[in-house]
Amino acid sequence: MVAPDESDRFLSRNLIASLIAVLAFPLSEIAALANFLPLVMPPGQVLAILAAAVVAMLQRRPLGRGAWAVCAWLAVSGGLILCLGISRLGWAATLDSFPPMFLVLGAYIILSRLLTPLAPAFRKILSCIMGASCLFVGAIIAWSILDAAVRFLPLVYDPVLYRMDALLGLGAAYRLGDSVNADQGFRHFILILYKYNLVAAVPALFSEVFYARKAAAELTLQLLISSFLVFPLFCMMPALAPAFFFGGLFPDHLPPAQSLATQVIGTNIGTIRNTFPSLHACWAILIFLALRDSPLWHRILGASFLLVTVIATLGFGEHYAVDWVAALPLVLLVRGVCCASLPLASPLRQSCVLSGIFLLAFWVVAVRGAPVTLEFPWMIRALAVLSLALPLALEKNLGVAERRPARLSPHAEPAHAA
């Protein structure tokens, strides 16, 4: 049986992730209705989510000041969305899709009330569902902001990233898609897994609940925080991705790297974006790490999803290979921030956070400092080696430290024994 205190810690982690998404969601919709961001979701769906969130919070008694403040914020922001939606779209369009969405969420709330008293395992399952839903909300927020930001970022760093790939000997990775592109059915399968990669997080969340020996499940928070951390990095180093920058030249007729100017090139980015580091790579690695203590076939599926992400990002020209190299420091930073098994003052946890920050900062300097930095190939190579070796070493120690509390705890019994 899962220890009650362990279940509460797990729920609190998903609650933090949910609050990050739900509190930011109204702001995103208000900005969209005010024409500052693209309108991604209809106002009726957003209002249904906010209303259900308030109803769910009011189910718990007594409510503290923080909970009342959150409810007040959701109510006020919901009123603003309603007013802005009516003035811009009218009553019918604003409330369209509100009833079905609210009914679905209401059924979820009722189900959670019925199952919560039965066992901590059921509470964890429902918390996983809630956390996964909030991941989609967080992704909508992050990418809607990116869609708006690219209109104000006319400079791209594709030539710099392409030359870094050549300098590191990673240009051959673009050929990963050759065998996949030969079979259109297989290509579409790989593309679907790549485009809807958050779906892979759902089974990983359940696996983390029932097999991980950590003090609290953290994947939801890791995926959400990484999506927001990538945004400022993208704004500092926007890019189109190889398939869009080179067009028909990718991958068979790519120009020699030295023939490209190292200065950034002005262009119309539109809605195409190449995040550096790769967020797809970061998510795939985090999902794989979450399955580390799961059964072998779970780990095989996680490794397969990681391989699919590698093929799709590089073989389809969605990312540069160096984006993967820089993803490891981002993973290290997120893992250090979200590690609930170690105290904040832990030297290992601080090492993970500081190493991730400094490595990412060095990459920002290396990319934005081109062409000067490209004149020192040894520096780029040394940074790439550090970005691989340091996260791997610290992650190994972090994995051992995460398992240690569970081994020492008298309640450290596998969750699937519930």
Image (spheres, rainbow, N blue to C red):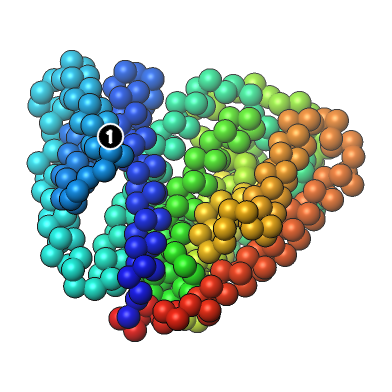
Q: Can you tell which quarter of the image residue 39 is in?
A: top left
Q: Is residue 305 above or below residue 31?
A: below
Q: Nearer the viewer, residue 240 or 109?
A: 109
- Residue shown at 67%/60% (left/top)? 348
Q: What's the amino acid at mark 1?
A: Ala
Which residue occupies the foreground of this view, 224 or 266? 224
- The residue that appears at 84% across and 35% down in the rendered structure is 373
Q: Is residue 150 above or below residue 3?
A: above
Q: Quadrant of the N terminus?
A: bottom left
| One can see residue 138 in this view | yes
Residue 86, quarter of the rendered image: top left
In the drawing, does residue 306 fall left or right of residue 147? right
Local SS, label 1: helix
Q: Residue at x 20, y 65 (%)?
A: 116
- Residue 194 position, x and y percent, is 47, 55
Q: Position of residue 319 (x, y in %)?
A: 60, 46
Q: Is residue 160 left or right of residue 52?
A: right
Q: Residue at x 12, y 57 (%)?
A: 110
Residue named by callout 1: 69
Image quarter (top left, top right, bottom left or bottom right) of the C terminus: bottom left
